[in-house]
């Protein structure tokens, strides 16, 4: 699995740096290419000669090579890598990563890198327990960085507690898991709908809803991380996502979303419909802005097509289909009915009873129900974690 994979190993100035030699050996043994970048402080803890010998590559530590004067191109290093690991990660480098500070080669490479990043923090127990450390780790997590938590044990200070870097074998297992997972949707082309739809009343007004698009974009992000091609059809949203394997199509209304979905679904292996689609639209769109006159104003609405149900009817039997349901009463009963009615393989249920779940929030609390009567309740998590849970649940079953 690691054969030919290109790994940048960032090493910072903590005593656990001495253990990194073992990680390099494990990675090399499995066929990975490893390039080490040291922070200035790391050189006091581990010898560049040891790292160069084990990795079979030059070790990078300055922006320029002091012998031949050549610039070390951090952008090329960042582009080269399939994965970046920073271990041990000191409190100092953690803080720089959280702030985007680029005062050394490792940090400049981190900011240039497009690949996934795994970090293994290591520091004394009080530093690890400090609220700033927790905030910085949280920030990294929100940027999609995978964190291998520090472990309990004896620390260099003589104290005992949480702060030891995870063992090289644990880091190695996480790297293996990462590459296994990043290939788990490799042969999939997934269509995802996201965001609200806007139905025009006149040139300046519309009927819409509070959907932020965050859930659909989180699904797209995780599907891309796991190797899928993604076609993301989104209603109006502030969300951003860029990736070579992403095709993003922006729409406004339900009818536009319907057209785009039907145009693209045929070439997809499956679809996840996370958009909050407007069930009705004004029967006519006024050509001019509607001026106020009477005390009341009536707007006739007509029903929009159900995009998900129409795909459920026309899909081939090899294509899988997942819907979302937002329910306020008898949630599981209603969600199961929708699952059957729309010919879905599974449905992701949100209930408005759960604090922090649903529209606008960064978190979600979901239950996934499948057509074989399995169901799984997940805890309240970030939408990115919820997206991972959805794919973890589905990949074994349908994908
Ligand atoms: N959906 C869709 N097109 C619509 C309405 C809904 O594609 N016109 C999709 C949503 O993206 C979601 C699922 O259908 O995946 C469930 O939508 P929901 O609004 O909960 O279900 P409805 O069938 O519209 O039922 P109701 O609004 O009556 O609860």
Image (spheres, helix red, strand yellow):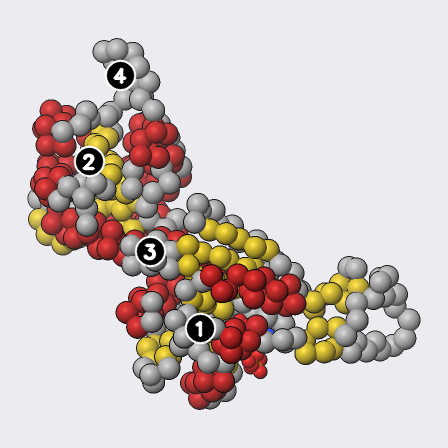
Q: Position of residue 310 (x, y in %)?
A: 55, 76
Name the residue tied to disc 4.
65
Residue occupying image coordinates x 29% and y 11%: 69
Label 1: how many Cα within 10 Å (few below 14, some 14–19, many 20+):
few
Measure the C-alpha gap from mark 3 to mark 4: 39 Å
Label 4: how many Cα within 10 Å (few below 14, some 14–19, many 20+):
few
Which dot, 2 or 1, sits closer to the camera? 1
Which dot, 2 or 4, sits closer to the camera? 2
Name the residue tied to disc 3.
186
Q: Are marks 4 and 1 in contact (CB under 8 Å)?
A: no
Question: Can residue 194 be seen here?
Answer: no
* Ligand 1: quadrant of the figure: bottom right
Which dot, 1 or 3, sits closer to the camera? 1
Q: Earlier in the sequence, mark 2 or mark 4?
A: 2
Check disc 4 and report its element: helix, strand or loop.
loop
Name the residue tied to disc 1.
316
Whether disc 2's CB lies below 8 Å from ligand 1 is answered: no
Image quadrant in which you'd find residue 302: bottom right
Which dot, 2 or 3, sits closer to the camera? 3
Image quadrant in which you'd find residue 26: top left
Name the residue tied to disc 2.
34
* Residue 241 to residue 376: above or below: above
Q: Earlier in the sequence, mark 2 or mark 3?
A: 2
Image quadrant in which you'd find residue 61: top left
């Amino acid at each position: 699995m690691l054969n030919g994979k290109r790994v940048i190993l960032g090493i910072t100035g903590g005593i656990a740096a001495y253990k990194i030699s073992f990680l390099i050996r494990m990675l090399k043994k499995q066929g990975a290419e490893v390039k080490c970048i040291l922070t200035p402080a790391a050189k006091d803890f581990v010898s560049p000669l040891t790292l160069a010998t084990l990795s079979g590559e030059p070790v990078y530590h300055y922006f320029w090579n002091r012998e031949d004067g050549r610039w070390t191109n951090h952008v090329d290093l960042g582009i080269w890598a399939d994965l970046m690991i920073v271990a041990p990660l000191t409190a100092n480098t953690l803080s720089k990563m959280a702030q985007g500070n680029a005062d050394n080669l490792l940090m400049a490479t981190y900011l240039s890198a497009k690949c996934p990043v795994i970090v293994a923090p290591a520091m004394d127990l009080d530093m690890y327990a400090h609220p700033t450390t927790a905030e910085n780790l949280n920030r990294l997590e929100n940027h999609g960085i995978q964190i291998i938590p520090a472990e309990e044990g004896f620390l260099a200070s003589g104290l005992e507690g949480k702060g030891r870097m995870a063992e090289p074998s644990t880091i190695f297992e996480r790297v293996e898991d990462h590459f296994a997972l990043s290939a788990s949707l490799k042969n999939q082309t997934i269509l995802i709908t996201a965001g609200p739809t806007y139905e025009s009343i006149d040139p300046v007004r519309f009927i819409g809803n509070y959907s932020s698009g965050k859930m659909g974009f989180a699904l797209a992000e995780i599907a891309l991380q796991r190797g899928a091609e993604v076609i993301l059809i989104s209603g109006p949203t502030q969300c951003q996502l860029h990736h070579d394997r992403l095709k993003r199509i922006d729409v406004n209304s339900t009818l536009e979303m319907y057209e785009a979905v039907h145009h693209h679904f045929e070439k997809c292996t499956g679809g996840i419909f996370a958009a909050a689609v407007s069930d009705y639209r004004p029967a006519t769109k006024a050509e001019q802005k509607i001026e106020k006159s009477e005390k009341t104003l009536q707007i006739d609405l007509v029903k929009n097509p159900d995009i998900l149900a129409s795909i459920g009817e026309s899909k081939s039997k090899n294509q899988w289909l997942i819907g979302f349901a937002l329910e306020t009463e008898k949630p599981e009963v209603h969600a199961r009915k929708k699952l059957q009615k729309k010919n879905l393989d599974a449905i992701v249920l949100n209930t408005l009873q759960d604090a922090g779940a649903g529209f606008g929030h960064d978190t979600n609390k979901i239950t996934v129900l499948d057509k074989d009567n399995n169901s799984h309740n997940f805890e309240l998590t970030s939408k990115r974690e919820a997206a991972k849970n959805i794919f973890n649940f589905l990949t074994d079953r349908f994908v």
